Image (cartoon, helix red, strand yellow):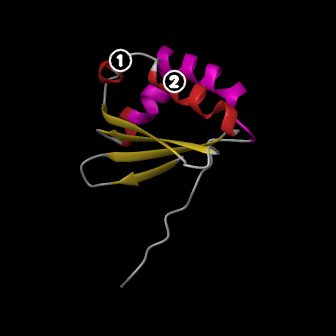
Amino acid sequence: MNLIDTGRGVVVFNVFPVRPENQEALVETIRSAGDASAIPGLLSMNLLRSEDGTHVINHMCWESREAFERAAASSPEIAATRDRVGPLLDGPGPYRYEIVPVGP
């Protein structure tokens, strides 16, 4: 997971490693988790799947770091989705990344 402060909120990238035969199941598990617009503080969510079938990225924009942390800690929908996603992963995940500045 990577949190990027955009000045108006937080962007979260959850990168999930997955076997190609489980990629679509992982996407559908996240897509069917419920109405994302009903989660307080979540502004948008997009899923990206790698063309080789080995990763899924959940890209979310939140109102604030606090809104993200509150939802991650207390949302029953998020907890249930985490439980269903775990068995589909191929290794530890989601991976965490550090932001490396580029340019001057």
Q: Who comes first in sequence, dot 2 or dot 1?
A: 2
Q: Disc 2 marks which amino acid?
A: Glu
Kindly report which numbered mark, 2 or 1, lies closer to the viewer in this rendering. Answer: 2
Horizontal and vertical percent position of residue 56: 55, 41
Horizontal and vertical percent position of residue 95: 62, 48
Q: What's the residue at 33%, 38% (across, down)?
A: 62
Horizontal and vertical percent position of residue 76: 50, 14
Q: What's the residue at 57%, 57% (across, down)?
A: 97
**Residue 98 quadrant:** bottom right
- Residue ID for mark 1: 35
**Main secondary structure of the magenta stretch:** helix
Mark 2 packing: few (<14 Cα in 10 Å), some, or many (20+)? few
Mark 1 packing: few (<14 Cα in 10 Å), some, or many (20+)? few
Where disc 1 sits, the SS reads loop
Q: What's the residue at 49%, 64% (across, down)?
A: 99
Where disc 2 sits, the SS reads helix
- Residue ID for mark 2: 28
Q: How many marks?
A: 2
**Residue 44 quadrant:** top left
User: Would you say 89 lies left or right of 38 here?
Assistant: right
Indicate yes or no whether the magenta region holds residue 84.
yes
- Residue situated furthest left in the rendering: 8
Which quadrant: the C terminus? Answer: bottom left
User: Residue 14 — which label?
Assistant: none
Report the magenta residues as a range.
68-91
Q: Are marks 2 and 1 in contact (CB under 8 Å)?
A: no
Horizontal and vertical percent position of residue 102: 42, 77
Q: Disc 1 marks which amino acid?
A: Asp
Indicate yes or no whether the magenta region holds residue 69.
yes
